[in-house]
């Protein structure tokens, strides 16, 4: 991994952890004095946009698994309020999964219908 990619990776982690841009910029300047901190900072939004454009199912699956893990850990430490919130979030994610399946079923049905229409049109052209 190049030094620039490593700096970007660590800067993204700092961003996700809630650090301010000015703090991240200072960190880059101290940790990687040979790199231009502004250049690294400008890449963070692009990286996040790219990840947001990823497969919705993968993102949804990750969120569901992370929420399950969070729920389990909250129960272990006795944070029942937090565990209940995790369950509520899991319920929302479950509803989102059902919506995604419904959309997928509709798209599959439409594709099938389009294919049937194309086959019928080809049959008519050949016989006509």
Image (tube, rainbow, N blue to C red):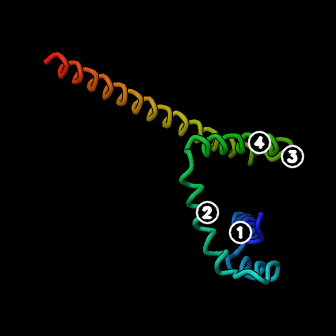
Q: Which residue is mark 4?
A: 69
Mark found first going from the N terminus, 2 or 4: 2
The residue wearing badge 1 is: 8
Mark 1 touches mark 2? (CB < 8 Å): yes
- N-terminal label among 4 and 3: 4
Distance in Å between CA atoms under marks 3 and 1: 34 Å
Q: Left or right of 126: which side holds 39?
A: right
* 81 and 105: which is toward the camera: 105
Q: CA distance from mark 2 to mark 4?
A: 26 Å
Horizontally, residue 48 falls left or right of residue 72, namely: left
Q: Nearer the viewer, residue 47 or 106?
A: 47
Residue 110 found in image quarter:
top left
- The residue labelled by disc 2 is 47
Query: Which residue carries the number 3 mark?
Result: 77
Q: Position of residue 91 (x, y in %)?
A: 61, 38
| Mark positioned earlier in the residue sequence (3 or 1) | 1
Q: Secondary structure at mark 4?
A: helix
Q: Looking at the image, is mark 2 or mark 3 nearer the viewer? A: 2
Q: Is residue 44 left or right of residue 126?
A: right
Q: CA distance from mark 2 to mark 3?
A: 34 Å
Task: Return the x and y of residue 111 as percentages of the image width and height.
Answer: 37, 30
Crowd class of label 4 (few under 14; some 14 to 19; many from 20; radius 10 Å): few
Q: Mark 2 or mark 1, which is nearer the start of the sequence? A: 1
The location of residue 97, given as percent across then percent down, is: 55, 36
Residue at 70%, 66% (x, y): give it.
12
Q: Quadrant of the N terminus?
A: bottom right
Q: Please report whichever mark, 2 or 3, sits nearer to the chain's N-terminal start.
A: 2
| Residue 24 location (% of width, % of height) | 73, 76
């Amino acid at each position: 991994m190049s030094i620039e990619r490593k700096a970007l990776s660590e800067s993204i982690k700092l961003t996700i952890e809630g650090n301010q841009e000015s703090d991240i910029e200072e960190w880059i300047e101290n940790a990687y004095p040979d790199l231009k901190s502004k250049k690294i900072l400008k890449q963070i939004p692009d990286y996040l946009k790219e990840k947001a454009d990823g497969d919705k199912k993968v993102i949804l699956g990750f969120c569901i698994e992370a929420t399950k893990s969070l729920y389990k850990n909250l129960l272990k430490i006795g944070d029942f309020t937090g565990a209940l919130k995790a369950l509520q979030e899991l319920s929302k994610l479950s509803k989102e999964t059902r919506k995604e399946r419904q959309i997928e079923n509709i798209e599959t049905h439409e594709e099938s219908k389009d294919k049937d229409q194309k086959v019928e049109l080809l049959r008519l052209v050949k016989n006509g």
